[in-house]
Image (cartoon, rainbow, N blue to C red):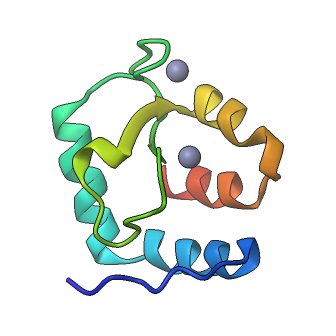
Amino acid sequence: MSRFNVGSTDGKRSRKYLEYISSPAWYWKRHEKLKLVTSCERCGSQEQLEIHHRTYERLGDERMEDLEVCCNPCHFREHSCIGSLIDSVLKRLA
Ligand SMILES: [Zn+2]
Ligand SMILES: [Zn+2]
């Protein structure tokens, strides 16, 4: 699997990120992670689960430990400082 060349600016990174999370590769990685972890790692909720990236360093080639399962409210809280664009996309995919 090829690695995305993650740009140094946030704008570039968000674009790559948005492309990636719409890809089949991400769909399967997300699926695998949700098989391993079935509840929010922050509050234990089993509803509206989403995947949060602990790091974008290996975007496109993540290790399972780079990912964190969290529910929509916890995820939203995590990202509230960087705006709602990514979260609104995540919500649509959830
Ligand atoms: Zn939660
Ligand atoms: Zn996240």
Q: Nearer the viewer, residue 44 or 56?
A: 56
Would you place residue 88 above or below residue 6 in this image? above
Q: Nearer the viewer, residue 18 or 6?
A: 6
Q: Nearer the viewer, residue 55 or 31?
A: 55
Taking the spot 35% from the left edge, 47% from the top edge, the residue there is 66
> Quadrant where the N terminus lies?
bottom left
Tally the numbered discs: 0
Taking the spot 33% from the left edge, 82% from the top edge, the residue there is 3
Q: Quadrant of residue 12?
A: bottom right
Taking the spot 41% from the left edge, 68% from the top edge, the residue there is 59
Locate residue 48, reporting x and y percent: 49, 33
Locate residue 16, reporting x and y percent: 55, 80
Left/right of residue 48 with respect to residue 15 in the rendered view:
left
Q: Quadrant of residue 34?
A: top left
Left/right of residue 4 with respect to residue 83 in the rendered view:
left
Would you place residue 59 above or below residue 90 in this image? below
Locate residue 93, reporting x and y percent: 50, 57
Taking the spot 45% from the left edge, 75% from the top edge, the residue there is 20
Left/right of residue 86 with respect to residue 31 in the rendered view:
right
Would you place residue 26 above or below residue 66 in this image? below
Locate residue 89, reporting x and y percent: 63, 61
